[in-house]
Amino acid sequence: MRLQTLLHAVFPPACLCCEGRVETDFALCGACWADTPFLLGAACDLCGVGLPGQSSLSGPLICEECHRIARPWSRGRAVLHYAGNGRKLVLGLKHADRAEVARAAGPWMARAAADLLADAPLILPIPLHWRRLAQRRFNQSALLAAALARASGCDWLPDALLRARHTPSQDGRDRDGRFANLDAAIRVAPRRAAAVAGRNILLVDDVMTSGATFSAAAQACHAAGAGQVCVMALARVARDA
């Protein structure tokens, strides 16, 4: 405690968005918290996208896109809209070495996915191909998965999924192009197959856009004999974004 107090005296905790003074590490200031687009209202039970109106008491809400597209997972959640401060936090984690964003996001994700965590699933991050991992030096999805595991007490495996082939960026591709780009691109690592078989799985990624990456990973888990597969994204891109 004394060491932490000393560190805070030298390096005061800073807001994750504006770098203003805050009381604790890995936090947002009041103004940035109010401006951060957390998904707090009604949302699709499959992809986590925010929906107009109130949450339904009669059953899960499913968005139009998820009615049109078969999702190879059971349920999905997201914490933020990928806009404004939500986008700033994700990009800071992904491209600016802001690992502290993942530390803050662990409890946020644990609250958003509380019902998905009730049966203690095995948490798996979406993998990067080794070429991209060498360029970036870390997998942002693995940082998020580790933070969620700490916050929830669930088991996680950072290397259970592999990118079977290097795929070009998804940026600029339409929905069909995104799915085609990720087709059969992810598989379960052979040495982790026994750990995945029979387990309920929660897949974790930083952003969900079309759901193509989650689909490839969920199909790989099912092919390896997993039980129920659910998905958790830090941020969800809205259809009109």
Image (tube, rainbow, N blue to C red):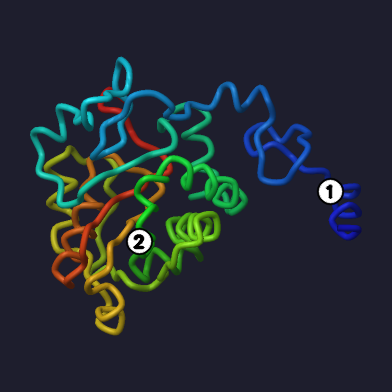
Residue, x 22% and y 74% (percent of image)?
197
- Locate residue 187 relative to residue 43 in the image: left or right: left
Query: Where residue 181 appears, x then y in whole percent?
Result: 17, 53
Which residue is identified by label 2?
121
Q: Are marks 1 and 2 in contact (CB under 8 Å)?
A: no
Question: Disc 1 or disc 2, which is closer to the eye?
Answer: 2
Residue, x 40% and y 70% (percent of image)?
157
- Quadrant of the frame with the C terminus: top left
Q: Is residue 224 above or below residue 8?
A: below
The type of residue carrying mark 2 is: Pro
- Quadrant of the frame with the N terminus: bottom right
* Frontmost residue, 111 versus 183: 111
The type of residue carrying mark 1 is: Phe
The numbered dot on residue 11 is 1
* Frontmost residue, 65 versus 43: 43
Query: Where residue 17 appears, x then y in whole percent?
Result: 63, 34
